Image: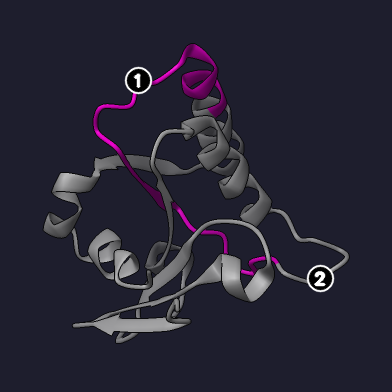
Amino acid sequence: MSKVITINGNIACIKYDLVCGKGVDALCTDYTKAPTSDNIYLVEIKGKNLTNAIENIEKTLKRDPNTGCGLVLKPREVFIVYDGNTPKSQQYESLKIQLMVKYKLVISEIPFNEANKHPIPSTALTLG
């Protein structure tokens, strides 16, 4: 069974797709700081389908009129944790650039075997 929230040091993550029914895997923040766009992070965990990761990020950034889910503060940084052997398609790279420009995002791609070096993705991975 998945956790809904997890805390590791100063980083707290909620399982966003479980709470809202769709979107990224986790919404994280440094809970010791005031909530701002600089302090909210999205984490998408993907094995192989990186294009689907971009779609989930965009679903999270748009407000859903049916569920009311959506973010008031727009994050500036997104982490995609993925299987490091997965090739990145031209379609994925193009969609990623469009998303970065449209929402003024930094998207960091981190292979699973390096995720434990980063406090935000490593905390999100503990959600299961």
Amino acid type, residue under disc 2 in the picture: Thr
Task: Note whether 24 is above or below 114 in the view shown.
Answer: below
Name the outermost residue toward the top: 90
Q: Residue at x 80, y 61 (%)?
A: 64
Q: Residue at x 72, y 69 (%)?
A: 69
* Residue 57 image position (x, y, % from top left): 56, 48
Is there a contact, CB below 8 Å, between mark 2 and mark 1?
no
Amino acid type, residue under disc 1 in the picture: Pro
Q: Secondary structure at mark 1?
A: loop
Residue 73 - label: none
Residue under numbered circle 2: 67
Q: CA distance from mark 2 to mark 1?
A: 34 Å
Q: Earlier in the sequence, mark 2 or mark 1?
A: 2
The residue segment tinted magenta is: 70-95
Residue under numbered circle 1: 87
* Residue 109 image position (x, y, % from top left): 31, 39
Left or right: 72, with 26 as reference point:
right
